[in-house]
């Protein structure tokens, strides 16, 4: 089985503060496809953003991650059970889950082993939903060019090999399920420049860069960003979100 990668524990607090949530339209679309609302499994839950949303609809939400540090920041609700477990080796009973969700995490998993686990724990007719947001968009101009500069030119060699699945919008990952077509969702947030820089520091490649060089790569674009985004004004930022949805 593929070796576990726990990349985000060291920056769990920053991740919790700056990572955007999934758009409401995504949940509206997904929940209309669910047959039963007894149990959901949010796998790779991180700080529990998705688990917290699902808990408003499901009787029980089982949320797992390999990072205890991430889950220490997770939202607490009485019907959420958090456990430190691999995606490929849960302690869930056979055929006990109505919905499996994996937000911005499945590219780290061992696909074959994880999908075997999904088929074991999901009830017949249940769903698996995988989604990821891709590179953000701000102005279709100089700011986006600066973001592309750090993403490609500065951090290109620091991304883990699994990043290719995100760059390919999850369209090339294995998906051995009866697929349900999904639209492209868009998560819109209004951020200051400082919030954007905080978010960029949550990138896994930024963490790898800082570990090697002793400083954040975000400092390398700060001056360029100041020149096109003066002061502390707010701008709308769009995160395109792509989903793969399948029925078991």
Image (spheres, rainbow, N blue to C red):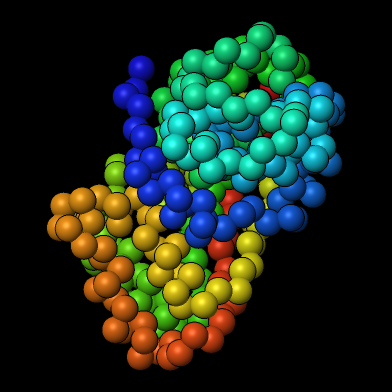
For the C terminus, the image quarter is top right
What x and y, as percent, mark residue 172? 46, 41
What number of labels is visible?
0
In the image shown, does 232 or 123 lie closer to the viewer?
232
Left or right placement of residue 11 versus residue 185 in this view: left
Is residue 171 something one can see in this rendering?
no
What x and y, as percent, mark residue 97? 71, 20
Q: Give the residue drawn at x 38%, y 49%.
A: 11
In the image shown, does 44 or 179 lie closer to the viewer?
44
For the N terminus, the image quarter is top left
Q: Give the residue drawn at x 35%, y 40%.
A: 7
Q: Residue furthest left?
A: 213
What x and y, as percent, mark residue 128? 65, 31
Left or right placement of residue 74 versus residue 218 in this view: right
Q: Give the residue drawn at x 29%, y 52%.
A: 207
Quadrant location of residue 61? Answer: top right
Left or right placement of residue 75 versus residue 139 in this view: right
Give above or below for 12 relative to 222. above
Is residue 183 something one can see in this rendering?
yes
What x and y, as percent, mark residue 132? 54, 48
Q: Give the residue drawn at x 31%, y 78%.
A: 222
């Amino acid at each position: 089985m593929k070796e576990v990668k726990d990349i985000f524990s060291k920056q769990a607090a920053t991740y919790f503060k700056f990572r955007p949530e999934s758009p409401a339209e995504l949940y509206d679309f997904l929940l209309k496809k669910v047959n039963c609302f007894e149990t959901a499994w949010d796998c790779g839950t991180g700080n529990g953003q998705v688990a917290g949303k699902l808990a408003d609809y499901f009787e029980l939400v089982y949320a797992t991650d390999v990072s205890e540090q991430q889950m220490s920041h997770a939202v607490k609700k009485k019907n959420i059970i958090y456990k430190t477990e691999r995606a490929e080796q849960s302690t869930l009973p056979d055929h006990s889950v109505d919905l499996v969700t994996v937000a911005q995490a499945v590219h780290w998993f061992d696909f074959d082993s994880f999908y075997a686990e999904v088929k074991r724990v999901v009830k017949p007719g249940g769903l698996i939903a995988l989604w990821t947001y891709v590179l953000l968009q701000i102005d279709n101009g100089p700011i986006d060019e600066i973001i592309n500069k750090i993403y490609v030119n500065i951090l290109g060699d620091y991304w883990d090999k699994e990043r290719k699945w995100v760059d390919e919008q999850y369209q090339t990952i294995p998906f051995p399920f009866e697929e349900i077509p999904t639209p492209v969702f868009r998560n819109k947030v209004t951020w200051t420049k400082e919030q954007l820089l905080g978010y960029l520091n949550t990138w896994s490649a930024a963490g790898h860069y800082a570990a090697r060089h002793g400083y954040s790569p975000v400092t390398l674009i700060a001056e360029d960003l100041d020149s096109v985004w003066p002061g502390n004004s707010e701008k709308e930022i769009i995160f395109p979100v792509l989903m793969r949805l399948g029925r078991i």
